[in-house]
Image (cartoon, rainbow, N blue to C red):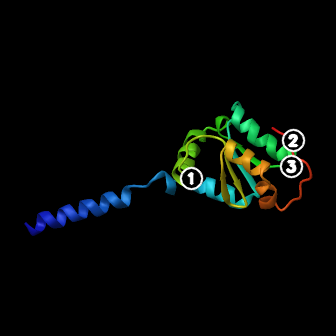
Amino acid sequence: MAVKILLASILVIAASLCWVSSADSTEAAFVKKTISAHKIVIFSKSYCPYCKKAKSVFKELNQVPFVVELDERDDGWNIQDALSEIVGRRTVPQVFINGKHIGGSDDTVEAYQNGNLAKLLGIEVEDKDEL
C-alpha cells in the first residue's frame, strides 16, 4: 500500500514538473520583455480596424508605439495565447504604456478622450479631435 502511495506521489510530482502553462512559455517571456523594453506597446493585427483605430490615437498624440503585428509573425498565434494568459483577453489590440495594460481599442480611445492617456504618457495635449 505504501509503495502505491509513493508511486502515485512520484507521478503527481513528475506531471507537475513537466506541465508548463503558456504564461511560462517563450512567447510569454517575449511579451513581458517587449512590454518592459518599450514605453508604448501595441499587440495588433495589420488588417484589424480596431487595431488601426488604437494606433491612430498615438499618431494624434505624436507618439510612436512599438507594434507587434501578430499576423505577420510565425509565432503570432502563440503570442496571442500568451497575451490571453497574461491579460485575460485574447482579442487585439492589446495596448501597454510604461508596462501597464491599458486594454483594447475602446479602452485606448476612451483614455485618449478623457485625457488619461496623455497623463500616462507624460505629455500635454491641447485639442483632441474625435476619432
Q: Which residue occupies the extreme right position in the image?
A: 126
The residue beneath circle 3 is 61
87 vs 47: above or below: below
Residue 98 position, x and y percent, is 73, 61
Q: Residue at x 89, y 54 (%)?
A: 125
Quarter of the image for residue 17 reads: bottom left
Residue 39 position, x and y percent, is 77, 58
The residue beneath circle 2 is 129
The residue beneath circle 1 is 87
Q: Residue at x 83, y 39 (%)?
A: 130
Quarter of the image with the C terminus is top right
Is residue 51 left or right of 64 when viewed as pictured? left
Foreground of the two, 16 or 131: 131
Nearer-N-terminus badge (3/2): 3
Foreground of the two, 20 or 53: 53
Quarter of the image for residue 57 reads: top right
Foreground of the two, 87 or 114: 114
Q: Give the class, few, some or many, for how many residues have Cα within 10 Å of label 1's Cα (few <14, many ≥20).
A: few
Using the numbered discs, state the Cα–Cα distance from disc 3 to disc 1 in whole angstroms.
25 Å
Closer to us: mark 3 or mark 2?
2
131 vs 33: above or below: above
Q: Amino acid at mark 3?
A: Leu
Nearer-N-terminus badge (3/1): 3
Q: Amino acid at mark 1?
A: Val
Using the numbered discs, state the Cα–Cα distance from disc 3 to disc 2 in whole angstroms.
10 Å
